[in-house]
């Protein structure tokens, strides 16, 4: 156990749809994870990494110790029988539960040890504990992968830790004791003390099983059976131990969260903008190197810059936005994250950037869409001019990473195709194609001028698009979920001029 290592524990993380591949790469890179398995919404892995490393994962929503992963359960038609079958299936052998709870407690102890040693700064000043600091500031509420039955309420952990309860010594400030082994947990003394273990089951069900049962019904049934089998007590409000169960058509997964708050709710972000995990994935795709100049020309609250600067602190970051209120909140976020030395903010328009040509290594941006950030003109019409300016400031070989609505993503993909390849539907919906239907030339002079103007504007747009396409190499499109909507990350490299 020395050096904060738990030998070969199996974990899983939940991830937003589309981010699993980034999370898979992240666990391999940061945790030297092995036996990595990716399924929709989850990544399973084994690692010897310590808790600090585990907590450094940025693409994960939540992190769990794996209790078991089973094939999907086949439920009998009879509902009562179904509950019984499910209880047996999910609970199984008590020794497996004890083994995982033992590992979980060891991780908690190591985390406490690490906190104790890092409590005193180089100047001898005691740092506030995580609990103290989280009490003095309001956490931003992120949309999370919430279980449907019960959710963590963010309240502090129970007063005593599991070991002291198991060992019958529930005292605050008790010295950290070596954790009992699974054998000790199973002995009669341990068994008695186990009745003081307070737990709660959070159940999510989807697919076939959700047609016959609600998550609440299943969560309750599993909770009753687990309490009976292990001698643990159910405690809905402030349990010591959370048991997460996900029943779906793919699998039945049971885990214990290692940290109470989701990893995705960052403690360094004051006001949340874009989903932090998506912002991190965009920065991950951007090839940020030491000394890189990174620009977000529509930075909003600065989430992408914050995520990037926390992970790659040896680069220089610039945020631009044309809205004062957004910039004020971005500035508060930068101060709160203690990144004022890394991130500069400026008021300007993305279509007229006050920056030298080819002066930026990475341009990364979340293009506004949806009701909240609708830009004054139709985004499809203005997009070529936004991109033109982004490409102008981007250095040769530089990277461009954009988050686009599905509609805008498809539109940009059509830029590459000659007009004859566009479907009739696209011809009807795309604003630039509104006059592609052959019409008789009008004799009305006003109408004639309009048609000429439209075609001149179209011609200009086509030229701008062609220039942009000639400067960029597409390097991948990645579908991601933003909770209520889907979006696409586009990645490009700027072609060096010959
Ligand atoms: C989708 S939001 C960015 C959100 C940001 N990623 C965050 O996490 O907060 C788009 C931003 O673009 C800004 N914007 C709109 N038109 C702009 C323009 N012409 N120039 C610069 N910024 C613009 C809006 O003020 C808004 O803050």
Image (tube, grey):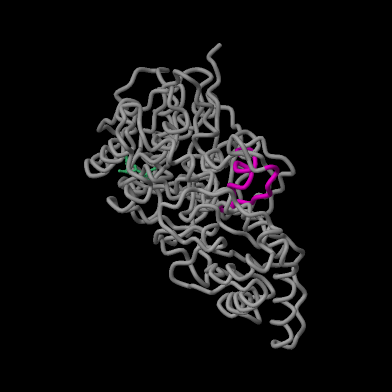
Q: Is 236 drawn above or below residue 272 in the view shown?
A: below
Asked whether residue 137 appears in the rendered view, the answer is yes
Q: Which residues are magenta?
A: 7-26
Q: Is residue 18 magenta?
A: yes
Q: Residue at x 62, y 77 (%)?
A: 218
Pick the front one: 179 or 16: 179
Q: Residue at x 48, y 66 (%)?
A: 239
Q: Is residue 375 magenta?
A: no
Viewed as shown, does residue 109 lie left or right of 213?
A: left
Quarter of the image where the C terminus is located = top right
Pick the front one: 420 or 239: 239
* Residue closest to the far top: 498
Q: Is 387 drawn above or below residue 427 in the view shown?
A: above
Q: Quadrant of ligand 1?
A: top left
Where residue 91 sits: x, y (%)? Answer: 70, 70
Asked whether residue 14 appears in the rendered view, the answer is no
Q: How many marks?
A: 0
Quarter of the image where the N terminus is located = top right
Splitting the image into 4 quarters, where does residue 314 fall?
A: top left
Where residue 432 sits: x, y (%)? Answer: 46, 44
Q: Is 239 drawn above or below residue 447 in the view shown?
A: below
Where residue 333 sits: x, y (%)? Answer: 30, 40
Q: Residue at x 49, y 32 (%)?
A: 465
Where residue 260 sits: x, y (%)? Answer: 48, 56
């Amino acid at each position: 156990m020395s050096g904060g290592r738990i030998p070969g524990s199996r974990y899983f993380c939940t991830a937003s749809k589309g981010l699993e591949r980034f999370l898979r790469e992240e666990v391999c890179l940061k945790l030297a994870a092995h036996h990595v398995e990716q399924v929709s919404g989850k990544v399973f892995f084994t690692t010897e990494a310590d808790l600090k490393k585990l907590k450094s994962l940025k693409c994960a929503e939540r992190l769990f110790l794996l209790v078991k992963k089973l094939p999907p359960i086949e439920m009998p038609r009879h509902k009562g029988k179904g509950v019984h079958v499910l209880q047996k299936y999910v609970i199984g052998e008590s020794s497996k539960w004890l083994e995982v709870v033992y590992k979980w407690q060891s991780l908690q102890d190591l985390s406490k040890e690490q906190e104790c040693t890092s409590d005193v700064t180089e100047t001898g000043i005691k740092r506030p504990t995580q609990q103290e600091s989280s009490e003095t500031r309001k956490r931003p509420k992120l949309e999370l992968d919430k279980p449907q039955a019960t959710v963590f309420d963010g309240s502090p952990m129970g007063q005593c830790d599991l070991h002291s309860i198991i060992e019958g010594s529930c005292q605050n400030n008790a010295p950290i004791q070596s954790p009992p082994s699974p054998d000790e947990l199973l002995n009669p003394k341990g068994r008695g003390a186990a009745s003081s273990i307070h737990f709660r089951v959070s159940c999510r069900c989807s697919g076939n099983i959700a047609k016959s049962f609600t998550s609440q019904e299943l969560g309750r049934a599993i909770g009753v059976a687990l309490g009976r089998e292990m001698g643990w007590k159910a405690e809905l409000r402030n349990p010591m131990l959370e048991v997460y169960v996900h029943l779906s058509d793919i699998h039945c997964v049971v885990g214990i969260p290692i940290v109470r708050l989701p990893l995705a709710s960052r403690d360094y972000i004051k006001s949340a903008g874009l989903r932090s995990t998506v912002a991190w994935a965009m920065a991950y795709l951007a090839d940020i190197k030491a000394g890189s100049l990174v620009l977000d020309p529509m930075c909003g609250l600065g989430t992408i810059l914050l995520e990037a600067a926390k992970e790659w602190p040896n680069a220089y970051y610039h945020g631009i936005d044309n809205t004062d209120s957004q910039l004020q909140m971005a500035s508060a976020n930068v101060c709160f994250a203690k990144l004022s030395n890394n991130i500069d903010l400026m008021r300007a328009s993305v279509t007229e950037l006050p920056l030298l040509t080819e002066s930026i290594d990475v341009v990364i941006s979340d293009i506004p869409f949806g009701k909240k950030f609708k830009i004054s003109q139709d985004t499809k019409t203005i997009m070529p001019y936004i991109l033109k300016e982004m490409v102008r400031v981007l250095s040769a070989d530089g990277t461009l990473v954009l988050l686009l609505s599905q509609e805008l993503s498809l539109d940009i993909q059509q830029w590459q195709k000659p007009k004859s390849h566009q479907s009739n539907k696209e011809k009807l919906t795309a604003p630039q194609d509104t006059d592609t239907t052959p019409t008789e030339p009008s004799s009305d002079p006003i109408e004639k001028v309009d048609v000429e103007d439209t075609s001149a504007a179209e011609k200009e747009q086509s030229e701008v698009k062609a220039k942009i396409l000639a400067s960029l190499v597409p390097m991948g499109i990645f579908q991601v979920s933003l909770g209520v909507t889907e979006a696409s990350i586009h990645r490009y490299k700027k072609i060096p001029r010959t």
